[in-house]
Image (cartoon, coloured by chain):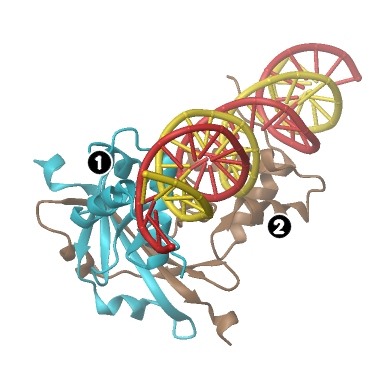
Chain colours: A cyan, B brown, C red, D yellow
Amino acid sequence: MNRISRKTKQRDAVHAVLERAERPLSVGELLESASERIEGLGVATVYRSVNALLEEGWIAAVEIPGEPVRYERSDKGHHHHFQCEKCERVFDIAGCVDSLRKLVPPKFRVKDHAVTFYGTCATCTA
Amino acid sequence: MNRISRKTKQRDAVHAVLERAERPLSVGELLESASERIEGLGVATVYRSVNALLEEGWIAAVEIPGEPVRYERSDKGHHHHFQCEKCERVFDIAGCVDSLRKLVPPKFRVKDHAVTFYGTCATCTA
DNA sequence: TTTTAAATGAGAATAGCTTATCATTATCAA
DNA sequence: TTGATAATGATAAGCTATTCTCATTTAAAA
């Protein structure tokens, strides 16, 4: 039977960076981090790796308007995000508020929601 | 003293459409609606009108990831949005939940937040 | 009116991110 | 080890949304 994908150090590197990341990372951030281990790593490869991991369902996209898409492991459960307007990094915010969906008129069917906070992160506030 | 702007039927039309809109509209939607009254209206003009109204502060941008920016009058107070995944329209959702910001760790300084609901609107659900 | 410069419309140009192309490299089954 | 072919890297191309350019129109002051 044919393999559809091969194990490469490039893919491993991208996987490893996401494995250890404690916040969502953009393709640019992934390239930067993974490049520390893989010399000459190309953007196209990062995109390809990310797309493979997305299809696998191992990572999920974190989208914030006007920002490049970021990615994080999809095993984190329901949570939201915070973007620092100084360092521009995005952080996970655990938990949610049940009463949120009560804001929506009853005739609307809510399937999902996203909350994004903006401000300055702990590091930049200090 | 010099006028910086002149009154034109094109600007009036864009203004009027936003005045009456009961939901945020994209440049495309604005062009479509305003074109009913102004024959041959161009996109560039809609962009110019929108930018002028933004600078005036009369309208505000409503941004949803992967979507073109929409605009709505800025006199609506704090509220959130709902996007229908069928008709793609965006609706206002009145109100908010105070306890939301308590989710954010104390060292973070929250300056703003946005909530976007996804699902099917009243019309598309019926 | 006449004048003059702001506004318009069409389309070219730009900007950011993402995908496609293709020659080269490297995985891995035999 | 070798051979078939998937993966890589560099870069061209694609996509959208938005701005720019410029000849022409038009608002509105004089």
User: Label for residue B93?
Assistant: none
Q: Is residue A20 left or right of residue C11?
A: left
Res D8 → quadrant: top left
Secondary structure at numbered mark 1? helix
Residue B111 shows in this picture: no
Residue A11 shows in this picture: yes
User: CB of mark 2 within 8 Å of CB of mark 1?
Assistant: no
Looking at the picture, tell me which residue is in the foreground, B104 or A3: A3
Q: Which amino acid does label 2 sit on?
A: Ser
Identify the residue under disc 2.
B33
Check the picture and name the quadrant holding the N terminus of chain B: top right
The chain that hosts pointer 2 is B
User: Residue at the spot x=47%, y=66% of the render?
Assistant: A2
User: Residue at the spot x=65%, y=56% of the render?
Assistant: B29
User: Residue at the spot x=17%, y=60% of the render?
Assistant: B104
User: Residue at the spot x=59%, y=62% of the render?
Assistant: B21
Secondary structure at numbered mark 2? helix
Q: Do labels 2 and 1 share a chain?
A: no
Determine whether B121 is above or below A12 in the image: below
Determine whether C29 is above or below A106 in the image: above
Q: Picture coordinates of residue C26 (x, y %)?
A: 36, 43
Q: Picture coordinates of residue B77 (x, y %)?
A: 39, 59
Check the picture and name the quadrant holding the C terminus of chain B: bottom right
Identify the residue under disc 1.
A33
Q: Is residue D26 left or right of residue B2?
A: right
Q: Picture coordinates of residue B61 (x, y %)?
A: 47, 50
